[in-house]
Image (cartoon, rainbow, N blue to C red):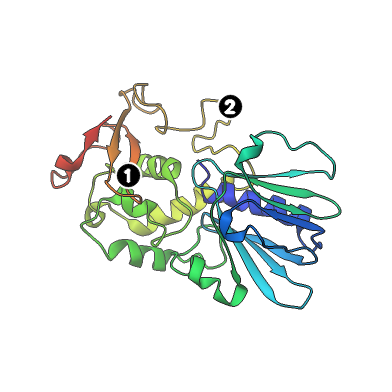
């Protein structure tokens, strides 16, 4: 799943290839922007904000616009040379094509596509908490937002982008394992929130320059995670069987959680009844 570091890397790659260049063609394959033509616009920069990818443009008339896309579970941007065959995903999943004289950026399976004046960019991303890979990263503000709902389970609180922007299910599970926290623990009982937020920042920061996400220090295939995706296998630390369960009941919270019962012992019964094994 694309998380904050993956979106950051997408943005960096796009910025290097189409940034500061003029679009010679654009193609939007979504109903809301089907007639939009950005030909002649200059890509000022491509940036990320949490899990949102922002293409900032200047039109020939000097107007500033921001194109937002979200990768969610299956989205990706790929870059091709002019004339190169677009490969890697089915053509019917293409949503945006941005063409310059040097490169063609093709967005597959993109979600939440919007084009707004840059002055209104906050309408798209202003609700987000501090960005783990952004210039606005602020541990104290992240802790303040997390602590504002002390009875909430810590796992969905970490996934909530309004608290801190960039954590997805992979980092949620790995972070809680590394901190030794049971995922259903209320925020108030989850220990040092500043240490947890700081560790989240470090994990995304060290992975930001590569597509593979690694928390174990071992980047070989299948060795990068402690608990994520390892249900039924022995914990790398203690050998206990890794468990998995569905946690939460809405779009923000409903995710599969992986954890080690020994390294992350249950410390409270207040939330246990909400857990559903899968």
Tell me residue 90's x, y (percent).
64, 34
Tell me residue 156's x, y (percent).
32, 50
Tell me residue 272's x, y (percent).
16, 41
Which residue is nearer to you in this view: 159 or 69? 69
Q: Which residue is mark 1?
A: 254
Query: With respect to residue 142, does 17 lie above or below?
Result: above
Q: Which residue is mark 2?
A: 220
Q: Are marks 1 and 2 in contact (CB under 8 Å)?
A: no
Give the mark, 1 or 2, whose residue is nearer the N terminus.
2
Tell me residue 225's x, y (percent).
47, 33
Label 2's element? loop
The crowd level at tag 2 (other Cα within 10 Å; few <14, some 14-19, many 20+) is: few
Q: Nearer the viewer, mark 1 or mark 2?
A: 1
The answer to whether residue 48 shows anywhere in this view is no
Label 1's element? loop
The crowd level at tag 1 (other Cα within 10 Å; few <14, some 14-19, many 20+) is: few
Q: What is the tally of numbered marks visible in this picture?
A: 2
User: Along the horizontal axis of the image, is 15 left or right of 201?
Assistant: right
Q: Quadrant of residue 178?
A: top left
Q: How far separated are the C-alphas under marks 1 and 2?
A: 29 Å
Q: Quadrant of residue 129?
A: bottom left
| Residue at horizontal 43 percent and vertical 67 percent from the top | 127
Query: With respect to residue 111, does 211 lie above or below?
Result: above
């Amino acid at each position: 799943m694309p998380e904050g570091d993956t979106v950051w890397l997408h943005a960096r790659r796009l910025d290097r290839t189409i940034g500061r260049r003029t679009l010679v063609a654009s193609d939007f394959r979504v109903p809301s922007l089907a007639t939009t033509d950005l030909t002649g616009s200059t890509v000022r920069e491509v940036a990320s904000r949490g899990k949102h990818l922002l293409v900032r443009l200047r039109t020939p008339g000097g107007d500033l616009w921001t194109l937002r896309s979200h990768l969610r579970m299956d989205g990706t941007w790929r870059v091709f040379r002019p004339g190169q065959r677009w490969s890697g995903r089915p053509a019917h999943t293409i949503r945006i094509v941005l063409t310059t004289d040097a490169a063609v950026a093709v967005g597959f399976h993109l979600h939440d596509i919007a084009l707004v004046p840059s002055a209104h960019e906050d309408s798209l991303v202003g609700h987000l908490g501090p960005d783990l890979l952004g210039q606005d990263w602020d541990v104290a503000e992240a802790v303040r937002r997390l602590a504002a709902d002390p009875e909430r389970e810590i796992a969905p609180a970490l996934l909530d982008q309004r608290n801190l922007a960039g954590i997805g299910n992979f980092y949620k599970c790995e972070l809680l394992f590394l901190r030794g926290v049971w995922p259903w623990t209320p925020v108030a009982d989850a220990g040092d929130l500043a240490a947890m937020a700081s560790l989240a920042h470090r994990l995304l920061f060290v992975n930001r320059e590569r597509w593979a996400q690694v928390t174990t220090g071992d980047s070989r295939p299948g060795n990068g995670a402690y608990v994520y995706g390892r249900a039924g296998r022995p914990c790398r630390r203690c050998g206990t069987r890794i468990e998995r369960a569905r946690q939460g009941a809405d779009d923000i919270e409903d995710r599969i959680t992986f954890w080690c019962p020994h390294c992350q012992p249950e410390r409270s019964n207040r939330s246990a009844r909400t857990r559903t094994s899968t």
